[in-house]
DNA sequence: CACTCGTGGCT
DNA sequence: TAGCCAAGAGT
């Protein structure tokens, strides 16, 4: 089967599909904190949090975030560190900075007046085709699809789309397929109904197409090939990185380094890491000398190594696996040179934004008791 | 376009 | 366990 003329339904079938989907949604829509109204700020915050993140994970973050930054103006004016702290543990931290950038764009560039179309919304930081479609349809009634993983899965099954959804060019295929299916009077409800459908009867792991409200429109169910859709190529394995994690202690607490503003865990705080690939030696005793030299050159601090016992911590990201060997050291409280770092007392660990990998290091050291 | 960028849940 | 998956965007 080709991708030509995928949407071959006659108008009466389109109308029946819309009614079946929306009737179900009217009766069984999930009650979610960001669905209490259609305020574009509420929709924007929730959608940014929901990018690549499950609903159940987002809910408590959304509640806290709204209590702390209740309006787009409040978010625009907040310290970036506070926004990152509110995002701690949610992952994909660039979303937090971009969300605040978008808020500042709305307040400053748009004089507080929201752009109301999907095209205009995509000029905002962190808002791409999906999120723009979601805000435009839900908050402003634009008849535009919001194509996320749910929409890909739902419509791939309904129409037996053979295009690989991992390929960026496939996006246009689905846009052309979905666009004529959207009811002009309820685009936002349509898009949200597709998402609810994609998380229940048409989920990835436990689909129940037999009882789906749109079963009669599901070609993959009709043909007994639900499991074949969507078509999606696999991702490569995580690459292994090995680090020494320096546990540097002084009278002022532990030394935390702020990560660079680009790349992994940007702007968050961690123990200083030394990439073992940067070392020229392989013997442990020689490596410690090298680590000490490298660290002192960038921090200005002299280290006195202290035996922690052999502690190793492993953490897997989407495409990287970090294997860290902890090294204990004592140092005096002196001025730090080039390294963006600060001493943090144990009781203050909760005041800075720490990634989950750092919390694992804390736990390995028994420093998470007060957290 | 291919790659980067987190985390938690589930099998 | 290792792999896959989840309301993607930026470069």
Image (spheres, coloured by chain):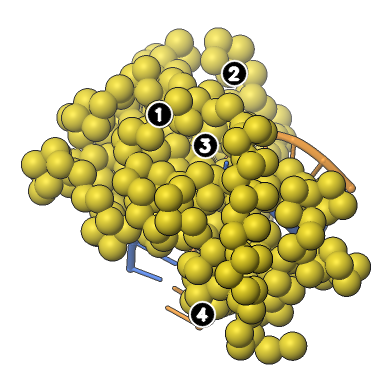
Chain colours: A yellow, B orange, C blue
Q: Secondary structure at mark 4?
A: loop
Q: Secondary structure at mark 2?
A: loop
Query: Residue at the spot x=19%, y=30% of the render?
Result: A73
- Please report whichever mark, 1 or 4, sits nearer to the chain's N-terminal start: 1
Q: Residue under circle 2? A: A368
Q: Residue under circle 1? A: A37
Task: Indicate the chain on which mark 1 is placed.
Answer: A
Task: Indicate the chain on which mark 4 is placed.
Answer: A
Front-most of A83 and A306? A83
Mark 4 → mark 2, Cα distance in angstroms:
46 Å
Depth check, mark 1 against mark 2: the one in front is 1
Residue A54 % position (x, y): 61, 40
Mark 1 → mark 2, Cα distance in angstroms:
38 Å
- Please report whichever mark, 4 or 2, sits nearer to the chain's N-terminal start: 4
Query: Residue at the spot x=50%, y=44% of the render?
Result: A189
Q: Residue under circle 4? A: A169
- Please report whichever mark, 3 or 4, sits nearer to the chain's N-terminal start: 3
Query: Residue at the spot x=22%, y=26% of the render?
Result: A74
Residue A289 % position (x, y): 51, 48
């Amino acid at each position: 089967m080709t991708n030509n003329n995928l949407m071959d339904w006659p108008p009466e079938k389109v109308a029946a599909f819309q009614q079946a989907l929306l009737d179900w949604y009217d009766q069984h829509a999930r009650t979610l904190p960001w669905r209490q109204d259609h305020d574009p700020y509420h929709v924007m915050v929730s959608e940014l949090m929901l990018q690549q993140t499950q609903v159940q994970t987002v809910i408590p973050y959304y509640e806290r975030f709204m209590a702390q930054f209740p309006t787009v103006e409040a978010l625009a004016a907040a310290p970036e560190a506070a926004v990152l702290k509110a995002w701690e543990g949610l992952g994909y931290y660039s979303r937090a900075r971009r969300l605040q950038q978008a808020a500042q764009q709305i307040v400053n560039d748009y004089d507080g007046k929201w752009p109301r179309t999907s095209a205009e919304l995509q000029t905002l930081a962190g808002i791409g085709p999906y999120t723009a479609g979601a805000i435009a349809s839900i908050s402003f009634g634009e008849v535009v699809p919001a194509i996320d993983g749910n929409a890909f899965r739902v419509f791939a099954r309904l129409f037996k789309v053979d295009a690989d959804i991992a390929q960026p060019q496939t996006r246009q295929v689905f846009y052309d397929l979905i666009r004529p299916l959207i009811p002009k009077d309820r685009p936002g409800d349509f898009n949200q109904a597709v998402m609810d459908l994609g998380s229940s009867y048409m989920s990835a792991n436990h689909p129940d197409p037999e009882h789906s409200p749109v079963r009669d429109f599901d070609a993959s169910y009709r043909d007994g090939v639900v499991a074949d859709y969507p078509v999606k190529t696999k991702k490569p394995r995580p690459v292994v990185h090995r680090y020494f994690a320096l546990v540097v202690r002084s009278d002022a607490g532990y030394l935390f380094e702020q990560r660079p503003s680009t790349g992994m865990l940007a702007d968050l705080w961690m123990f200083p890491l030394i990439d073992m690939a940067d070392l020229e030696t392989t013997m442990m005793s020689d490596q410690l000398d090298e680590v000490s030299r490298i660290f002192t050159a960038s921090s200005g601090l002299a280290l006195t190594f202290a035996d922690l016992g052999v502690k190793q911590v492993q953490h897997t990201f989407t495409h990287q696996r970090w294997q860290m060997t902890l090294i204990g050291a004592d140092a005096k409280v002196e001025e730090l040179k080039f390294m963006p770092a600060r001493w943090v007392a144990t009781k203050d660990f909760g005041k800075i934004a720490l990634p989950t990998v750092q919390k694992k290091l804390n736990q390995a050291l028994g420093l998470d008791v007060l957290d």
